[in-house]
Image (cartoon, rainbow, N blue to C red):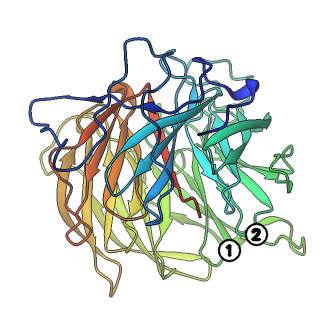
Amino acid sequence: MPRPLPAASRSRSNKARPRPIHWAKGVALMLSLAAAHGFAQTQTTGDTSASASASAPTRSTTGEVYDLLIGTYTGSGKSEGIYVYRFDAGSGELSRIASAQTVNPSYLVVSRDRNFVYAVNELPGDNGPASQRGGVSAFRFDRASGQLSFLNRVSSDGNDPCYLAISPDGRYLLTANYSVAANPGGSFAVFPLSADGHVGTSVLTVHHEGSGPVKGRQDNSHVHSTVFSPDGRYLFAQDLGVDKVFAYRYTPDGSRGLFGPTEARYTQIRPGSGPRHLIFDASGKHAYLTTELNASVLVFNYADGKLTETQSLPMTAPGFKGKIGGGALHLSPDGRFLYATNRGDVNQLVAFAVDPANGHLKLLKRYPTLGKTPREFAIDPTGRWLVVGNQDSDSAYFFRRDPATGELASDPKQLSIGSPVDFKFVSPS
């Protein structure tokens, strides 16, 4: 039985017992998977404060039960912060076991020892005062019970923090400050991490200057993500506002400053494209980038701090005239497939096959996410499930995935949750 949360991080229901999930029936094309896929069919009562009548999936010897952390937006009042679910990748059973109240935890990162969770507090937002700074919150994570305990919160040293990364040596936490407002503008900030999980005040903040051709979206710098190279020697900061991927050397011994620009300084991305998220493959030889404003996926060769573009593919089908918005991208656990989200009016997951010889992509299929504004998503460690959140329709869908073909089943299950954004699977061992 999970242990109760400390009062500071207890959910509104004041209950720490796991809650079975009501899987909404959704649209007509969704079929019942009760028999085929073994989803838990226990339903919640109308009183959400009632304790669950079924317990969460226990840790199995097969290693297929994971904790799923979901970060949300809280401004609408439909969400209270971070939610923790226990997910059985074998049966598909899902149960809510904990939550922690914090403002707009729209992006999460878990420490490598899985004992701590860090969340952005994305403030002030589109209509907030430019003088208000966002935050970064730290939580202790009890892997046995799935409970989160608040540790501390510091200023993000910028506006609208939207991404987090931990340095490969575990010494620093970095946040990308998107900054809707031109003043202070986009930046990334660096925070020391203590052994007990607390995050310290920033020791370095790097601001970018410039703009791009898309008025209203590229009037100033907007740092959207900060990603370390596989060897841990370089940091790449994706700046949507100036169409550049900035490259920095990471020298924790201080011999050249903590972070300093490389000789090339940046990789220029097509004007008006808006670089957003970057990932590397397991070999460390290839990288993939989503662009938000023209909804494309770019492929790069990578070596010694330098990115060289080799391919660019659109996410949107030819002839589409509505609004678009490239979002997140992730590789399957075996590296054979890549998926990316496209928002706006299209609301799709786009699947690509990866050529192992050169890292190039081949379009496989576009899948509707069955909701509005799919931002982040995650593939479970077994590769058999993909969960995507629809931020503006308060839903997350769990697609059964074929690891051999990369195909997603057409009958996903729906989880109702307020403004879901980010998803992180955590292994118990």
Q: Quadrant of the C terminus?
A: bottom right
Identify residue for label 2: 169
For disc 2, the neighbor class at 10 Å (few under 14, some 14 to 19, many from 20) is few
Q: Residue at x 25, y 47 (%)?
A: 38
Q: Are marks 2 and 1 in contact (CB under 8 Å)?
A: yes
Q: Position of residue 233 (x, y in %)?
A: 70, 75
Left or right, residue 377 beside residue 32: right
Q: Residue at x 37, y 74 (%)?
A: 334
Please state which of residues 304 and 384 is positioned toward the viewer in this rendering.
384
Q: Amino acid at mark 2?
A: Asp
Query: From the viewer's perspective, is residue 204 above or below residue 346?
Result: below
Q: Secondary structure at mark 1?
A: loop
Please state which of residues 332 and 165 is positioned toward the viewer in this rendering.
332
Query: From the viewer's perspective, is residue 409 above or below residue 82?
Result: below
Q: Position of residue 227 (x, y in %)?
A: 60, 61
Q: Earlier in the sequence, mark 2 or mark 1?
A: 2
Q: Residue at x 17, y 38 (%)?
A: 321
Q: Residue at x 74, y 38 (%)?
A: 156
Identify residue for label 1: 232
Q: Quadrant of the N terminus?
A: top right
Numbered marks: total: 2
Left or right, residue 402 beside residue 386: left
Q: Nearer the viewer, mark 2 or mark 1?
A: 2
Whether residue 322 can be seen here: yes
Whether residue 291 can be seen here: no
